[in-house]
Image: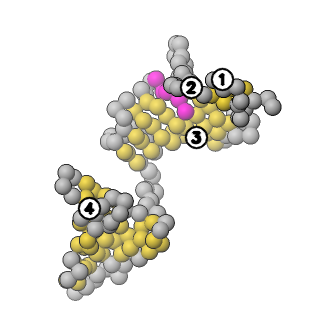
Amino acid sequence: GGNVGIGTSSPNKLLHLVANGPVLALGSSGTADPRIDFYDSGTTTTGGALFLDQDADALKLQRTASGSATDGIVINSSGHVGMGTVTPDTRLDITSSGVHGLILNQDTSNTDASSRIFFKDGTRTNAILNVSGNLEFRTGATIGSSSGTKRLVVRANGTIRFNEAYTFPASD
């Protein structure tokens, strides 16, 4: 069928590799960066690349559109991941221009709530989430099963509610 197999006698893809360890090792001699290029519909102007940028000492996933390359995700030598930056300052650094940012979309099992941001220390996990347009801060959350107890709710109309007991109006 035209398929090539390495480590298998019955390849089911154009190139099918089977091994008990690494299946591909890329290296370079001289100044060339080892890379894997991906092209869309046979053109070299639209696609992407995964490569080791030796000058930046970083692994990069890059997107190419109309011949112009843009770094998508960068992992530097410290293990820091950057999106929108080639020099991430912390474990995850998302940098953007304008009103772009990080989006946590709705919980697919509860369309009234967003996904959660969890904050965890050695004894407790807390969460922040959007529920029906209200921003909620909760304590005692359990990742994967409970969003915890509501402690502070900033409602869409501007009122603030503490511990389900006290409500402050949007204005005096």
Element type where label 2 sits in the image: loop
User: Looking at the magenta stretch, what is its main secondary structure?
Assistant: strand
| Residue in front for this viewpoint, 141 or 99 | 141
Is 103 displayed left or right of 125 in the figure? right
Residues at marks 4 and 1 touching, judged by CB atoms closer than 8 Å:
no
Which residue sits at x=45%, y=45%?
A: 84
Q: CA distance from mark 3 to mark 2?
A: 29 Å
Which residue sits at x=40%, y=40%?
A: 81
Q: Which span is picked out in magenta?
A: 50-54
Which of marks 4 and 3 precedes in the sequence?
3
| Amino acid type, mark 1 | Ile
| Amino acid type, mark 3 | Arg
As drawn, the residue found furthest toward the top would be 30
Q: CA distance from mark 2 to mark 1?
A: 8 Å
Q: Which mark is residue 6?
A: 1
User: Label 2 belongs to which residue?
Assistant: 19
| Amino acid type, mark 2 | Ala
Which residue sits at x=41%, y=76%?
A: 132
Q: Is residue 121 above or below residue 172?
A: above
Which residue sits at x=19%, y=83%?
A: 166
Which of marks 1 and 2 precedes in the sequence?
1
The reply to whether residue 56 is in sight is: yes
| Amino acid type, mark 4 | Asn
Residues at marks 3 and 1 touching, judged by CB atoms closer than 8 Å:
no
Q: Nearer the viewer, mark 3 or mark 4?
A: 4
User: Label 3 belongs to which residue?
Assistant: 63
